[in-house]
Image: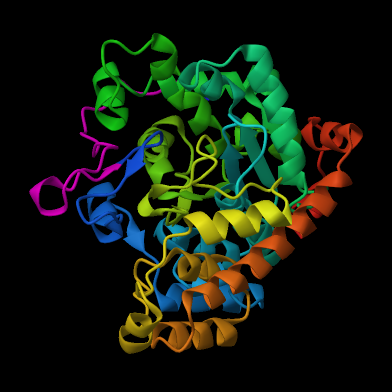
Amino acid sequence: MAEPAPPAAEPQPAASAEGGEESGTQVVTPWEVSGGQEGGIDYDKLVEQFGCSKLDDAMIARVERLTGVKAHPFLRRGIFFAHRELDQVLDAYEKGQPFYLYTGRGPSSEALHMGHLIPFQFTKWLQDAFKVPLVIQLTDDEKCMWKNLPVEETRRLARANCKDIIACGFDPQRTFIFADFDYVGGAFYQNVVRIAKCVTLNQVRGIFGFVGEDHIGKAAFPPVQAAPSFPTSFPHMFGDRVDIRCLIPCAIDQDPYFRMTRDAAPRLGYLKPALIESRFFPALQGESGKMSASDPTSSINVTDTPKDIKGKINKYAFSGGGETVEEHRDKGANLAVDVPWKYLNFFLDDDEELARIGREYGAGRMLTGEIKAKLVEVVTEIVERHKAARALVTDDVVDAFMTPRPMPWGELFG
Protein backbone atom coordinates (compact mmCIF):
# COMPACT_ATOMS: atom_id res chain seq x y z
CA MET A 1 0.00 0.00 0.00
CA ALA A 2 1.42 3.34 -1.05
CA GLU A 3 1.88 6.11 1.46
CA PRO A 4 -0.57 9.01 1.10
CA ALA A 5 0.32 12.32 -0.43
CA PRO A 6 0.49 15.28 1.96
CA PRO A 7 -2.95 16.29 3.26
CA ALA A 8 -4.94 18.39 0.85
CA ALA A 9 -6.25 21.77 1.91
CA GLU A 10 -9.73 21.25 0.50
CA PRO A 11 -12.39 22.55 2.92
CA GLN A 12 -15.05 20.18 4.20
CA PRO A 13 -18.58 21.28 5.10
CA ALA A 14 -19.02 21.45 8.84
CA ALA A 15 -20.88 18.61 10.53
CA SER A 16 -23.00 21.10 12.44
CA ALA A 17 -25.67 21.96 9.90
CA GLU A 18 -27.13 25.10 11.39
CA GLY A 19 -30.16 26.62 9.78
CA GLY A 20 -29.22 30.22 10.60
CA GLU A 21 -31.83 32.93 10.78
CA GLU A 22 -34.35 31.18 8.57
CA SER A 23 -34.67 27.90 10.47
CA GLY A 24 -33.27 28.74 13.90
CA THR A 25 -30.59 26.60 15.47
CA GLN A 26 -30.83 23.28 13.66
CA VAL A 27 -27.79 21.22 14.62
CA VAL A 28 -26.92 17.83 13.13
CA THR A 29 -23.67 16.15 14.15
CA PRO A 30 -22.78 12.52 14.95
CA TRP A 31 -23.38 13.36 18.64
CA GLU A 32 -26.17 15.94 18.65
CA VAL A 33 -29.39 16.33 16.68
CA SER A 34 -31.84 19.16 17.30
CA GLY A 35 -34.38 20.90 15.07
CA GLY A 36 -34.73 24.58 14.27
CA GLN A 37 -37.35 27.02 15.44
CA GLU A 38 -40.13 25.04 13.74
CA GLY A 39 -39.09 21.95 15.70
CA GLY A 40 -38.47 19.61 12.76
CA ILE A 41 -35.33 18.73 10.84
CA ASP A 42 -34.91 20.48 7.48
CA TYR A 43 -33.68 17.54 5.39
CA ASP A 44 -33.49 19.56 2.18
CA LYS A 45 -31.06 21.90 3.90
CA LEU A 46 -29.01 18.94 5.14
CA VAL A 47 -28.74 17.49 1.64
CA GLU A 48 -27.61 20.86 0.32
CA GLN A 49 -25.13 21.56 3.11
CA PHE A 50 -23.68 18.05 3.30
CA GLY A 51 -23.44 17.77 -0.49
CA CYS A 52 -25.17 14.41 -0.88
CA SER A 53 -27.91 13.55 -3.39
CA LYS A 54 -31.57 12.66 -3.00
CA LEU A 55 -32.79 9.19 -3.86
CA ASP A 56 -35.31 9.31 -6.69
CA ASP A 57 -37.95 6.91 -7.98
CA ALA A 58 -35.75 5.87 -10.91
CA MET A 59 -32.97 4.66 -8.62
CA ILE A 60 -35.41 2.79 -6.38
CA ALA A 61 -36.88 1.12 -9.48
CA ARG A 62 -33.36 0.17 -10.56
CA VAL A 63 -32.71 -1.49 -7.19
CA GLU A 64 -35.89 -3.52 -7.67
CA ARG A 65 -34.89 -4.48 -11.20
CA LEU A 66 -31.37 -5.58 -10.25
CA THR A 67 -32.44 -7.59 -7.20
CA GLY A 68 -35.80 -8.88 -8.39
CA VAL A 69 -37.18 -7.88 -4.98
CA LYS A 70 -39.79 -5.26 -4.11
CA ALA A 71 -38.15 -2.22 -2.51
CA HIS A 72 -38.15 -2.13 1.27
CA PRO A 73 -40.79 0.18 2.81
CA PHE A 74 -37.96 2.40 4.05
CA LEU A 75 -37.06 3.04 0.40
CA ARG A 76 -40.61 3.31 -0.91
CA ARG A 77 -41.59 5.80 1.80
CA GLY A 78 -38.52 8.03 1.66
CA ILE A 79 -37.12 7.06 5.06
CA PHE A 80 -33.80 6.27 3.39
CA PHE A 81 -33.83 9.37 1.23
CA ALA A 82 -30.28 10.43 0.34
CA HIS A 83 -27.11 8.85 -0.99
CA ARG A 84 -23.55 9.28 -2.11
CA GLU A 85 -22.69 7.40 -5.32
CA LEU A 86 -25.20 4.58 -4.84
CA ASP A 87 -25.48 4.69 -8.62
CA GLN A 88 -21.84 3.63 -8.93
CA VAL A 89 -22.42 0.64 -6.64
CA LEU A 90 -25.40 -0.39 -8.77
CA ASP A 91 -23.33 0.07 -11.95
CA ALA A 92 -20.65 -2.23 -10.52
CA TYR A 93 -23.20 -4.78 -9.32
CA GLU A 94 -24.82 -4.88 -12.76
CA LYS A 95 -21.40 -5.70 -14.24
CA GLY A 96 -20.90 -8.55 -11.77
CA GLN A 97 -18.42 -6.65 -9.60
CA PRO A 98 -18.70 -7.32 -5.84
CA PHE A 99 -19.47 -4.93 -3.01
CA TYR A 100 -19.96 -5.28 0.72
CA LEU A 101 -22.07 -3.55 3.35
CA TYR A 102 -20.82 -1.76 6.45
CA THR A 103 -22.89 -0.41 9.32
CA GLY A 104 -22.41 -0.07 13.07
CA ARG A 105 -23.58 0.69 16.56
CA GLY A 106 -22.14 2.69 19.45
CA PRO A 107 -22.90 0.57 22.56
CA SER A 108 -23.81 3.09 25.25
CA SER A 109 -26.95 1.47 26.71
CA GLU A 110 -28.07 -1.97 27.81
CA ALA A 111 -30.99 -2.19 25.39
CA LEU A 112 -31.60 -0.91 21.89
CA HIS A 113 -34.62 1.28 21.22
CA MET A 114 -36.85 1.13 18.17
CA GLY A 115 -34.83 3.79 16.36
CA HIS A 116 -31.69 1.66 16.67
CA LEU A 117 -33.42 -1.13 14.74
CA ILE A 118 -33.94 1.02 11.64
CA PRO A 119 -30.44 0.71 10.07
CA PHE A 120 -30.19 -2.96 10.99
CA GLN A 121 -33.59 -3.84 9.53
CA PHE A 122 -32.70 -2.07 6.32
CA THR A 123 -29.19 -3.52 6.18
CA LYS A 124 -30.60 -7.04 6.57
CA TRP A 125 -32.89 -6.36 3.62
CA LEU A 126 -29.94 -5.13 1.55
CA GLN A 127 -27.88 -8.19 2.46
CA ASP A 128 -30.70 -10.57 1.53
CA ALA A 129 -31.63 -8.69 -1.66
CA PHE A 130 -28.09 -8.33 -3.05
CA LYS A 131 -26.61 -11.44 -1.36
CA VAL A 132 -23.46 -9.63 -0.23
CA PRO A 133 -21.19 -9.73 2.83
CA LEU A 134 -21.58 -7.37 5.77
CA VAL A 135 -19.32 -5.98 8.49
CA ILE A 136 -20.82 -4.43 11.63
CA GLN A 137 -18.61 -2.27 13.83
CA LEU A 138 -19.33 -1.91 17.57
CA THR A 139 -17.57 1.30 18.62
CA ASP A 140 -17.05 0.50 22.29
CA ASP A 141 -13.96 2.73 22.23
CA GLU A 142 -16.00 5.72 21.01
CA LYS A 143 -18.59 5.39 23.79
CA CYS A 144 -15.84 5.01 26.36
CA MET A 145 -14.50 8.40 25.26
CA TRP A 146 -17.74 10.31 24.54
CA LYS A 147 -19.91 8.93 27.34
CA ASN A 148 -17.04 8.68 29.85
CA LEU A 149 -17.86 5.02 30.51
CA PRO A 150 -15.25 2.55 31.81
CA VAL A 151 -13.57 0.36 29.21
CA GLU A 152 -14.93 -2.76 30.87
CA GLU A 153 -18.52 -1.43 30.75
CA THR A 154 -18.48 -0.51 27.06
CA ARG A 155 -16.99 -3.91 26.23
CA ARG A 156 -19.82 -5.58 28.14
CA LEU A 157 -22.43 -3.40 26.44
CA ALA A 158 -20.96 -4.26 23.03
CA ARG A 159 -21.64 -7.97 23.57
CA ALA A 160 -25.10 -7.28 24.95
CA ASN A 161 -25.97 -5.09 21.96
CA CYS A 162 -24.49 -7.69 19.64
CA LYS A 163 -27.23 -10.13 20.70
CA ASP A 164 -29.88 -7.61 19.69
CA ILE A 165 -28.17 -7.07 16.34
CA ILE A 166 -27.90 -10.79 15.61
CA ALA A 167 -31.59 -11.14 16.50
CA CYS A 168 -32.37 -9.00 13.43
CA GLY A 169 -31.63 -12.10 11.35
CA PHE A 170 -28.31 -11.53 9.59
CA ASP A 171 -26.77 -14.32 7.53
CA PRO A 172 -23.99 -15.87 9.67
CA GLN A 173 -22.15 -17.05 6.54
CA ARG A 174 -21.82 -13.49 5.24
CA THR A 175 -21.67 -11.37 8.42
CA PHE A 176 -18.72 -10.38 10.61
CA ILE A 177 -19.42 -8.33 13.75
CA PHE A 178 -16.49 -6.82 15.62
CA ALA A 179 -15.86 -4.62 18.65
CA ASP A 180 -13.05 -2.09 18.30
CA PHE A 181 -11.39 -2.95 21.61
CA ASP A 182 -11.01 -6.56 20.43
CA TYR A 183 -10.40 -6.29 16.69
CA VAL A 184 -8.43 -3.09 16.02
CA GLY A 185 -4.87 -4.05 15.14
CA GLY A 186 -3.00 -5.60 12.23
CA ALA A 187 -4.28 -4.67 8.77
CA PHE A 188 -7.18 -2.70 10.25
CA TYR A 189 -4.92 -0.48 12.34
CA GLN A 190 -2.60 0.02 9.39
CA ASN A 191 -5.53 1.57 7.54
CA VAL A 192 -6.41 3.68 10.59
CA VAL A 193 -2.92 5.19 10.51
CA ARG A 194 -3.00 5.71 6.75
CA ILE A 195 -6.29 7.58 7.01
CA ALA A 196 -5.07 9.65 9.97
CA LYS A 197 -2.10 10.87 7.92
CA CYS A 198 -4.52 12.21 5.30
CA VAL A 199 -6.43 14.50 7.66
CA THR A 200 -5.02 17.64 9.28
CA LEU A 201 -6.04 18.84 12.74
CA ASN A 202 -7.68 21.89 11.14
CA GLN A 203 -9.74 19.60 8.90
CA VAL A 204 -10.92 17.38 11.74
CA ARG A 205 -11.91 20.46 13.75
CA GLY A 206 -13.87 21.81 10.79
CA ILE A 207 -15.59 18.51 10.04
CA PHE A 208 -16.46 17.47 13.59
CA GLY A 209 -16.45 20.70 15.54
CA PHE A 210 -13.82 19.63 18.08
CA VAL A 211 -12.55 22.37 20.41
CA GLY A 212 -9.41 22.85 22.44
CA GLU A 213 -10.99 21.43 25.59
CA ASP A 214 -11.75 18.05 23.94
CA HIS A 215 -9.33 15.27 24.80
CA ILE A 216 -7.11 13.97 22.01
CA GLY A 217 -8.91 10.63 21.89
CA LYS A 218 -11.84 12.30 20.15
CA ALA A 219 -9.65 13.64 17.36
CA ALA A 220 -8.02 10.22 16.98
CA PHE A 221 -11.29 8.28 16.68
CA PRO A 222 -12.68 9.27 13.22
CA PRO A 223 -10.12 7.16 11.29
CA VAL A 224 -11.26 4.14 13.34
CA GLN A 225 -14.82 4.55 12.07
CA ALA A 226 -13.49 5.20 8.57
CA ALA A 227 -11.29 2.10 8.30
CA PRO A 228 -14.10 -0.47 7.77
CA SER A 229 -14.86 1.33 4.50
CA PHE A 230 -11.77 -0.27 2.97
CA PRO A 231 -11.73 -4.03 2.20
CA THR A 232 -8.13 -4.64 3.29
CA SER A 233 -9.24 -3.95 6.88
CA PHE A 234 -10.74 -7.46 6.74
CA PRO A 235 -8.09 -9.76 5.22
CA HIS A 236 -9.93 -12.86 6.46
CA MET A 237 -12.84 -11.84 4.22
CA PHE A 238 -11.32 -10.04 1.24
CA GLY A 239 -7.60 -10.80 1.32
CA ASP A 240 -5.58 -7.92 -0.10
CA ARG A 241 -8.11 -6.86 -2.75
CA VAL A 242 -8.64 -3.11 -3.02
CA ASP A 243 -11.23 -3.22 -5.81
CA ILE A 244 -14.29 -4.16 -3.71
CA ARG A 245 -16.75 -1.34 -3.17
CA CYS A 246 -18.35 -0.56 0.19
CA LEU A 247 -21.94 0.62 0.73
CA ILE A 248 -22.79 2.16 4.10
CA PRO A 249 -26.43 2.36 5.29
CA CYS A 250 -26.63 4.94 8.09
CA ALA A 251 -28.54 7.91 9.46
CA ILE A 252 -27.54 11.18 7.87
CA ASP A 253 -25.87 12.44 11.07
CA GLN A 254 -23.01 9.99 10.35
CA ASP A 255 -22.25 11.69 7.02
CA PRO A 256 -19.30 13.77 8.36
CA TYR A 257 -17.25 10.63 9.09
CA PHE A 258 -17.60 9.43 5.54
CA ARG A 259 -17.02 12.76 3.84
CA MET A 260 -13.62 12.56 5.50
CA THR A 261 -13.24 8.92 4.45
CA ARG A 262 -14.18 9.62 0.84
CA ASP A 263 -11.62 12.44 0.70
CA ALA A 264 -8.87 10.07 1.87
CA ALA A 265 -9.82 7.01 -0.20
CA PRO A 266 -8.36 7.88 -3.64
CA ARG A 267 -5.13 9.11 -2.06
CA LEU A 268 -4.72 5.67 -0.52
CA GLY A 269 -5.60 3.72 -3.65
CA TYR A 270 -9.09 2.74 -2.47
CA LEU A 271 -12.52 3.22 -3.98
CA LYS A 272 -14.67 5.80 -2.24
CA PRO A 273 -17.33 4.25 -0.01
CA ALA A 274 -20.92 4.88 -1.08
CA LEU A 275 -23.65 5.83 1.40
CA ILE A 276 -27.41 5.43 1.62
CA GLU A 277 -28.74 7.70 4.36
CA SER A 278 -31.91 7.81 6.44
CA ARG A 279 -34.03 10.35 8.22
CA PHE A 280 -34.06 10.28 12.01
CA PHE A 281 -36.50 8.22 14.00
CA PRO A 282 -38.24 10.89 16.07
CA ALA A 283 -38.63 10.90 19.82
CA LEU A 284 -42.11 10.19 21.16
CA GLN A 285 -42.46 13.90 21.95
CA GLY A 286 -41.90 14.92 18.32
CA GLU A 287 -39.35 15.70 15.65
CA SER A 288 -37.19 18.24 17.45
CA GLY A 289 -34.57 15.50 17.72
CA LYS A 290 -34.04 11.78 17.43
CA MET A 291 -35.07 9.09 19.90
CA SER A 292 -32.59 8.72 22.78
CA ALA A 293 -31.97 5.67 24.94
CA SER A 294 -30.87 7.97 27.77
CA ASP A 295 -34.40 9.43 28.04
CA PRO A 296 -36.88 6.60 28.74
CA THR A 297 -39.85 8.89 28.09
CA SER A 298 -38.61 9.58 24.54
CA SER A 299 -38.05 5.98 23.48
CA ILE A 300 -39.60 2.56 23.15
CA ASN A 301 -37.00 -0.06 23.98
CA VAL A 302 -36.83 -3.58 22.62
CA THR A 303 -37.00 -4.81 26.23
CA ASP A 304 -40.27 -3.00 27.02
CA THR A 305 -43.31 -5.03 28.05
CA PRO A 306 -46.62 -4.70 26.18
CA LYS A 307 -47.84 -2.65 29.14
CA ASP A 308 -44.79 -0.36 28.91
CA ILE A 309 -45.33 0.15 25.18
CA LYS A 310 -49.02 0.97 25.56
CA GLY A 311 -48.32 3.38 28.42
CA LYS A 312 -45.53 5.23 26.59
CA ILE A 313 -47.47 5.62 23.36
CA ASN A 314 -50.68 6.73 25.06
CA LYS A 315 -48.93 9.13 27.44
CA TYR A 316 -45.99 10.54 25.49
CA ALA A 317 -46.56 10.11 21.72
CA PHE A 318 -47.19 13.62 20.38
CA SER A 319 -50.53 13.91 18.60
CA GLY A 320 -51.41 16.08 15.65
CA GLY A 321 -55.11 15.51 16.32
CA GLY A 322 -57.58 18.10 17.52
CA GLU A 323 -57.77 19.07 21.18
CA THR A 324 -61.40 17.97 21.30
CA VAL A 325 -63.32 15.32 19.39
CA GLU A 326 -65.40 18.05 17.77
CA GLU A 327 -62.34 19.97 16.58
CA HIS A 328 -60.73 16.77 15.34
CA ARG A 329 -63.82 15.72 13.39
CA ASP A 330 -63.98 19.20 11.86
CA LYS A 331 -60.32 19.83 10.97
CA GLY A 332 -58.73 16.38 11.00
CA ALA A 333 -55.22 15.52 12.16
CA ASN A 334 -52.02 17.31 11.20
CA LEU A 335 -50.06 14.35 9.86
CA ALA A 336 -46.90 16.46 9.46
CA VAL A 337 -46.38 16.54 13.24
CA ASP A 338 -48.26 13.44 14.44
CA VAL A 339 -45.86 10.91 15.96
CA PRO A 340 -48.12 7.82 15.82
CA TRP A 341 -48.61 8.43 12.10
CA LYS A 342 -44.86 8.86 11.58
CA TYR A 343 -44.10 5.66 13.50
CA LEU A 344 -46.59 3.69 11.41
CA ASN A 345 -44.72 4.90 8.32
CA PHE A 346 -41.66 3.14 9.72
CA PHE A 347 -43.23 -0.06 10.98
CA LEU A 348 -46.54 -0.85 9.25
CA ASP A 349 -45.70 -3.05 6.25
CA ASP A 350 -49.06 -2.87 4.48
CA ASP A 351 -49.00 0.10 2.07
CA GLU A 352 -52.74 0.03 1.46
CA GLU A 353 -53.61 -0.02 5.15
CA LEU A 354 -51.16 2.80 5.81
CA ALA A 355 -52.73 4.90 3.07
CA ARG A 356 -56.21 4.20 4.47
CA ILE A 357 -55.15 5.26 7.97
CA GLY A 358 -53.62 8.44 6.57
CA ARG A 359 -56.83 9.33 4.76
CA GLU A 360 -59.14 8.54 7.66
CA TYR A 361 -57.02 10.16 10.37
CA GLY A 362 -56.16 13.18 8.25
CA ALA A 363 -59.84 13.75 7.55
CA GLY A 364 -60.84 13.38 11.21
CA ARG A 365 -62.81 10.17 10.73
CA MET A 366 -60.24 8.22 12.78
CA LEU A 367 -59.55 9.48 16.30
CA THR A 368 -56.20 9.88 18.07
CA GLY A 369 -57.00 7.01 20.41
CA GLU A 370 -57.63 4.73 17.44
CA ILE A 371 -54.34 5.46 15.66
CA LYS A 372 -52.44 5.09 18.93
CA ALA A 373 -54.14 1.72 19.50
CA LYS A 374 -53.01 0.61 16.03
CA LEU A 375 -49.46 1.73 16.76
CA VAL A 376 -49.46 -0.15 20.07
CA GLU A 377 -50.50 -3.30 18.20
CA VAL A 378 -47.83 -2.94 15.50
CA VAL A 379 -44.94 -2.03 17.83
CA THR A 380 -45.84 -4.70 20.42
CA GLU A 381 -45.73 -7.38 17.74
CA ILE A 382 -42.29 -6.23 16.54
CA VAL A 383 -40.86 -6.04 20.06
CA GLU A 384 -42.22 -9.43 21.12
CA ARG A 385 -40.87 -11.02 17.94
CA HIS A 386 -37.49 -9.42 18.60
CA LYS A 387 -37.42 -10.68 22.19
CA ALA A 388 -38.12 -14.23 21.01
CA ALA A 389 -35.31 -14.03 18.44
CA ARG A 390 -32.87 -12.56 20.96
CA ALA A 391 -33.60 -15.32 23.46
CA LEU A 392 -32.11 -17.78 20.96
CA VAL A 393 -28.81 -15.86 20.69
CA THR A 394 -26.39 -17.57 23.06
CA ASP A 395 -22.85 -16.50 23.93
CA ASP A 396 -21.62 -19.18 21.53
CA VAL A 397 -23.64 -17.60 18.72
CA VAL A 398 -22.13 -14.19 19.56
CA ASP A 399 -18.65 -15.71 19.48
CA ALA A 400 -19.36 -17.27 16.09
CA PHE A 401 -20.37 -13.92 14.56
CA MET A 402 -17.47 -12.05 16.19
CA THR A 403 -14.67 -14.49 15.38
CA PRO A 404 -12.50 -13.52 12.38
CA ARG A 405 -12.77 -16.50 10.08
CA PRO A 406 -12.20 -17.37 6.45
CA MET A 407 -15.25 -16.66 4.34
CA PRO A 408 -15.20 -18.40 0.93
CA TRP A 409 -16.00 -16.15 -2.01
CA GLY A 410 -18.83 -18.38 -3.13
CA GLU A 411 -20.57 -17.92 0.22
CA LEU A 412 -19.88 -14.19 0.41
CA PHE A 413 -21.17 -13.14 -2.98
CA GLY A 414 -24.21 -15.23 -3.82
Residue 89 is situated, as x and y percent measured from the top left of the image, at: 51, 58
Q: Determine which quarter of the picture holds residue 377.
A: bottom right
Q: Residue at x 49, y 17 (%)?
A: 145
Q: Residue at x 46, y 21 (%)?
A: 146
| Relative vertical location of residue 57 with respect to residue 272 in this rendering, above or below | below
Q: Is residue 388 left or right of residue 279?
A: right
Is 207 in front, or is 197?
A: 207
Main secondary structure along the magenta-highlighted residues? loop
Residue 394 visible at all = yes
Residue 119 is situated, as x and y percent measured from the top left of the image, at: 57, 52
Q: Quadrant of the C terminus?
A: bottom right
Q: Determine which quarter of the picture holds residue 320.
A: bottom left
| Relative vertical location of residue 291 with respect to residue 357 in this rendering, above or below | above
| Relative vertical location of residue 169 with respect to residue 30 in this rendering, above or below | below
Is 184 in front, or is 212?
A: 212
Magenta span includes 9: yes
Q: Residue at x 42, y 20 (%)?
A: 196
Residue 369 is situated, as x and y percent measured from the top left of the image, at: 53, 73
Q: Residue at x 21, y 27 (%)?
A: 9
Residue 132 visible at all = no
Is 181 in front, or is 297?
A: 297
Question: What is the span of residues highlighted in magenta in the rendered image?
Answer: 3-27
Residue 96 is situated, as x and y percent measured from the top left of the image, at: 64, 63
Q: What colouring method underlies this structural image? A: rainbow
Magenta span includes 157: no
